[in-house]
């Protein structure tokens, strides 16, 4: 009997500590969002939402789904000279690149994404 009471007390303590940690964590995230004068936090969160929903709706045969992500790496944007971008690599070997600040798609190996990126003139004259 004492063992089951002790186990119940341990479970309650773990739940209380975990709940307090989660509440504190959510409070910190809310403070970051509230203190963001430029709205960048909300823009990036919205873009991530859009990317997640578009990635999960497309199958891996159409180019990377949310569950097929192999890695996500933030790299400096040396081509632009400043800032950084997030490169997401998928199981099928393809990748997508997103601007770290705006969340905008800036590069992709998938044919279906090329129309979102715009047409680049191959003439270098």
Image: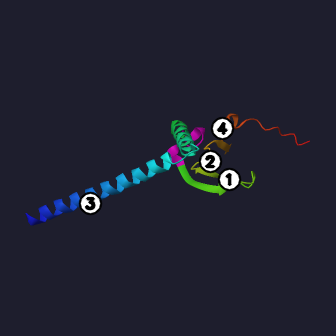
Q: CA distance from mark 4 to mark 2?
A: 20 Å
Q: CA distance from mark 4 to mark 1?
A: 22 Å
Q: Earlier in the sequence, mark 3 or mark 4?
A: 3
Q: Earlier in the sequence, mark 3 or mark 1?
A: 3
Secondary structure type for disc 2: loop
Q: Is residue 119 left or right of residue 11?
A: right
Q: Check disc 3: other Cα within 10 Å, few if <14, some if 14-19, many if 20+.
A: few
Q: Is residue 8 left or right of residue 39?
A: left
Secondary structure type for disc 4: helix
Q: Is residue 52 above or below residue 7?
A: above
The answer to whether residue 109 is visible is no
Q: Earlier in the sequence, mark 4 or mark 2?
A: 2
Residue lying at 7% horizontally and 63% vertically, measured from the top left: 1
Q: Residue 50: x and y, percent?
A: 54, 38
Q: Check disc 2: other Cα within 10 Å, few if <14, some if 14-19, many if 20+.
A: some
Label ID, residue 83 = 1
- The residue where tag 4 is placed is 113
Q: Is 120 covered by the magenta stretch?
A: no
Secondary structure type for disc 3: helix
């Amino acid at each position: 009997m004492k063992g089951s009471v002790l186990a119940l007390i341990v479970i309650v303590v773990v739940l209380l500590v975990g709940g307090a940690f989660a509440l504190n964590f959510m409070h910190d995230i809310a403070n970051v969002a509230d203190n963001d004068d430029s709205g960048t936090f909300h823009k990036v969160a919205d873009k991530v939402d859009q990317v997640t929903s578009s990635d999960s709706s497309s199958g891996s045969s159409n180019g990377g789904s949310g569950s097929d992500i192999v890695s996500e790496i933030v790299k400096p944007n040396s081509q632009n000279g400043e800032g950084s971008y997030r490169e997401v690599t998928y199981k099928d070997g393809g990748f997508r690149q997103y601007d770290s600040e705006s969340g905008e798609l800036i590069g992709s190996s998938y044919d279906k994404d090329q129309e979102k990126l715009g047409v680049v003139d191959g003439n270098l004259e």
